[in-house]
Amino acid sequence: MLLRRVFLALSLPLLLGGSLQAAPKKTVLLVGSGPDGHPPRTHEYRAGLKVLHKCLQGVPNLEVQVVEAIEPWREGPELMQRVDGVVLFLSEGARWMQHDPKRLQALQKLAAQKGGLVVLHWGMGTKDAKYIDAAVKLLGGCHGGPDRKYAVVETSLSLANPTHPITNGIQPFKIKDEFYYRLKFASPPARVTPLVQATIEGKEETVAWAWRRPDGGRSFGFSGLHFHENWGREEYRRLVAQGVLWTLDLPIPAKGLPVDIRAADLELKK
């Protein structure tokens, strides 16, 4: 029994695409917010991050922390400066990150230290165009301004870059979701790598991307996940979890990260 435990401990990093050499431990902070006025079962930030936490729990050398950013969230800037990566799944994130100058400075410092940045759905958004530029410099893309586009569609998702590690183990599929599209991307656009595209109004629109930032760090964004039930799709869970790993420069299995959950993991607290 002891030999079996030793074998499993040694083989798990190999199964996940790593090596026997000890890798430095990374910490990622999953930041959510409470209800923002959308109907139940949409914009369920806390419940969604609970699912993501579950998907990342078994990754070697990764510590996952989940927090709710309750305003004024004075401890937030310090928390974000103590980790290797941050995931934002919250309301109007592009504006939120600039609501407190210390919050923006903390994210900028994390980026300068080659930290990972991930934004999901409204976490990349702003109604006011004045918040777009700073968000794009950190994230590579933003859903912002009065001309922002979004639509609830039942559509096909295709892989714009099927050889990228984030898309490992994912095949094209159909889904109903509200996608933000025609996003504002970093210039020049060639630096941003489209990963997933949705057919909207007869055109292929980028809804997920990866970006190797000029500071040497990495950012990932996905504009889907309006509906909480879509966390039930293995493709969605794998895409987001592997996006997190990529931004942290952690190995991603060639056949995809195991992201199994139970039905109970999708339940919403009453």
Image: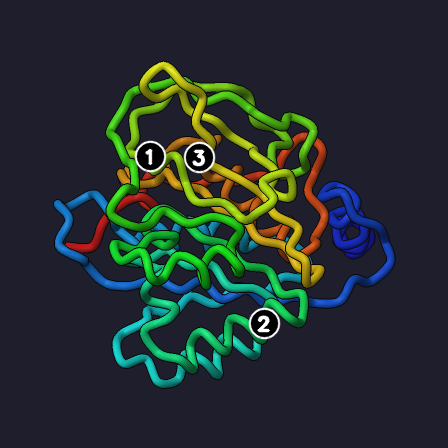
- Name the kind of residue labelled 1 in the image: Phe
Residue 39 drawn at (x, y percent): 12, 45
Q: Earlier in the sequence, mark 3 or mark 2?
A: 2
| Identity of the residue furthest to the top in this view | 202
In whole angstroms, how far apart are the C-alphas of marks 3 and 2?
A: 25 Å
Circle 1/circle 2 CB separation < 8 Å: no
- Name the kind of residue labelled 2 in the image: Leu
Q: From the viewer's side, name the closer residue of 245 and 260.
A: 245
Element on which disc 3 rests: strand
Q: Is residue 264 above or below residue 21?
A: above
Name the residue rendered at 29%, 20% in the picture: 154
Q: Is residue 260 above or below residue 45?
A: above
Residue 110 circle label: 2
Label 1 sits on residue: 179
Circle 3/circle 1 CB separation < 8 Å: yes
Name the residue rendered at 39%, 35% in the picture: 182
The number of discs equals 3
Label 3 sits on residue: 207
- Would residue 107 appear left or right of 145 to someone viewing this image? right
Q: Earlier in the sequence, mark 1 or mark 2?
A: 2
Name the residue rendered at 71%, 60% in the picture: 216
Element on which disc 2 rests: helix
Quarter of the image containing the C terminus? Answer: bottom left
Name the residue rendered at 33%, 62% in the picture: 130
Q: Label 1: how many residues lie within 10 Å, few (<14), some (14-19) or many (20+)?
A: many
Within the image, what quadrant is residue 50 found in?
bottom left
Q: Is residue 216 above or below residue 77?
A: above
In whole angstroms, how far apart are the C-alphas of marks 3 and 1?
A: 7 Å
